[in-house]
Image (tube, helix red, strand yellow):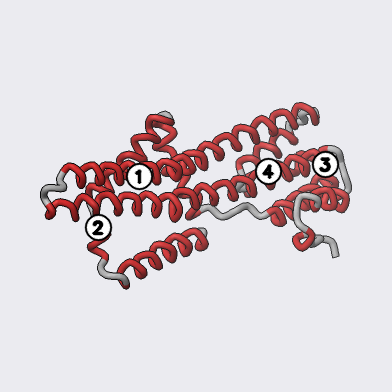
Amino acid sequence: MDLATIIGIVSAFSLVLVAVASGGGLSWFLDGPSALIVLGGTFGAVLVNYPLADVLGVIKVAQNAFFKKGQKARAAIELLVMMSKISRKDGMLALQNMTHRLRDPFLIKAVNLLIDGLEPLDLTNILDTELDFIEERHRLGAEIFTTMGNYAPAMGMTGTLIGLVQMLMRMNDPSSIGPAMSVALVTTFYGVLLAYLLFLPLAGKLKRLSAQELLVKQLIINGILSIQAGDNPRILEQKLHAFVSPHERKSVFK
């Protein structure tokens, strides 16, 4: 579970609610029509922009921002160094005994291709293609949230226009001006709140997780190719350290 995402969202909304409550009352900011305009308009526009399957799939993508831990490059380097040692000592086929202990499907596929004896160019092409489609799936999830973040304030402005029209059409009835202004202002508030405290931050978190995962997978490709080439484990480690920052470059060799 990613505590940063949960703490960020809870604290942001909580502080806004505290500020709202301290200035009067929460009930002033509760308006059903405003919520319908923003939520209905945002999701309707997203459905127009993307296929239904992609929009429904974004629910699963959103779970990654809350429950998926970023892959650690250092752990991947240590694992690949260990695999290099095994392959140099017992041969490539000895790596087959490790596949049942691996959790990353991409690494499992890379090891199986290595064991199958594919040429380096073919192995690279297959894994690079896999990497490209993983990146595309990740990009789509983050893009949908970014789109929602762009539409929500626009729907808020739409609600503001609706409220102003209602207010102007009822100027002869002073009692109706207040509710109309409420819709006008609260709808914009909802749109901005959802966009900048939920949708856009989630898009940013998904992009960060994607970049981190793609880095580790690119590291895996280079590590597998190094193992295939029969590089010394120390050389392999030095090659893979180029993918991480200096403070993460801790050698497994004493």
CA separation in Å, label 1 and label 3: 56 Å
For label 2, the SS is loop
In which quadrant is the C terminus drawn?
A: bottom right
- Farthest residue, direction bottom: 22
**Circle 2 is placed at which residue position?**
30
For label 4, the SS is helix
CA separation in Å, label 2 and label 1: 17 Å
Residue 188 in the image, given as x and y percentages of width and height? 34, 50
Category of crowding for the residue at label 3, using alpha-carbon neighbours closer than 10 angstroms: few (below 14), some (14–19), many (at least 20)? many
**On screen, 155 above or below 32?**
above
Give amino acid for label 3.
Ser
Give amino acid for label 4.
Lys
Give amino acid for label 2.
Leu
Which sits earlier in the primary sequence, circle 1 or circle 3? 1
Q: Which residue is found at the position 65% from the left and 43% from the top? A: 214
**Circle 1 is placed at which residue position?**
157
Residue 247 in the image, given as x and y percentages of width and height? 77, 63
Which sits earlier in the primary sequence, circle 2 or circle 3? 2
Q: Nearer the viewer, residue 83 or 190?
A: 190
Q: Could you tell whether 148 is left or right of 36 in the image? A: right
Disc ID at residue 217 = 4
Which of the two marks, 2 or 1, is nearer to us in this view? 1
CA separation in Å, label 2 and label 3: 60 Å
The mark total stands at: 4
Residue 151 in the image, given as x and y percentages of width and height? 41, 41
Which of the two marks, 3 or 4, is nearer to us in this view? 4
**Circle 3 is placed at which residue position?**
226
Q: Which residue is found at the position 34% from the left and 65% from the top? A: 17
